[in-house]
Image (spheres, rainbow, N blue to C red):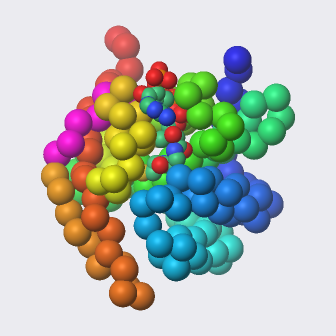
Amino acid sequence: MHVDIQPVQSADVAAVAALAREIWQAAYAEIISQAQIDYMLDQRYNAPRLLDELATPGYWWDQAFLDGERVGFSSCYLTGAPGELKLDKLYVHPARQRGGVGGALIARVLEHGRAAGCDTLLLAVNKQNARAITAYEKHGFTVRDSVRVDIGGGFVMDDFIMARSIPQAAP
Ligand SMILES: CC(C)(COP(=O)(O)OP(=O)(O)OC[C@H]1O[C@@H](n2cnc3c(N)ncnc32)[C@H](O)[C@@H]1OP(=O)(O)O)[C@@H](O)C(=O)NCCC(=O)NCCS
């Protein structure tokens, strides 16, 4: 199965946000409330915000296609700490999970980090999101920290911080 990874363009923003909603409904319904899902989708996937991130240096959005169908996406950005890249989003359609799409997106994120001279890739994942934690462990991440972050609206994110190294290119 060939996973085609392409940069997200401005014209893709609405389709990516719609895909996010579909995946979030499936992934988070048993973990956070519907009100928190709606709040976080509005906060993170509104068109002006996505367009702003697409235009920001040191920020990368990618999307994954299988047979021409958009099935997943990722975003990452330079945190400002030396050598550090954050995997901010990684989402694959429920019908296409466990087929290597997530791994292919992580591989592209590692390429961005390598090209930018980074050595560490980190992320935050809900402590109850066992499937994602298992996936991240499979792809080389380990838990580094535990945090509770107030995201406004009366909601908190109760997350593990996971990290892995970014391999340098073979000599
Ligand atoms: C986490 C996620 C992006 C992984 O994408 P993916 O395309 O399934 O990733 P891969 O196919 O590369 O790796 C899948 C691995 O994840 C783990 N995994 C995924 N689903 C699982 C499940 N239902 N049960 C057990 N392990 C699971 C396994 O380690 C699996 O490897 P295996 O199939 O060889 O056993 C995807 O599951 C997803 O979108 N989940 C919902 C959204 C989400 O939670 N995103 C992360 C937010 S921090």
* Any part of residue 159 in sight: yes
User: Residue 16's spot in the image, x, y percent?
Assistant: 70, 57
Left or right of residue 121, residue 20 in this image: right
103 or 167: nearer the viewer: 103
Residue at position x 68%, y 37% from top? 95
Q: Quadrant of the C terminus?
A: top left
User: Residue 140's spot in the image, x, y percent?
Assistant: 31, 28
Residue at position x 41%, y 88% from top? 153
Classify residue 101 by image quadrant.
Answer: top right
41 or 52: nearer the viewer: 41
Magenta span covers which residues? 139-144
Left or right of residue 95, residue 134 in this image: left
User: Residue 129's spot in the image, x, y percent?
Assistant: 38, 49
Looking at this view, name the residue that lies furthest to the left: 145
Left or right of residue 108, residue 13 in this image: right
Classify residue 52 by image quadrant.
Answer: bottom right
Residue 170 vs 81, above or below: the answer is above
Residue at position x 66%, y 34% from top? 96
* Any part of residue 10 in sight: no
Looking at this view, name the residue that lies furthest to the bottom: 153
Residue at position x 73%, y 36% from top? 65
Based on the picture, tell me whether residue 141 belongs to the magenta stretch. Answer: yes
Based on the picture, tell me whether residue 18 belongs to the magenta stretch. Answer: no
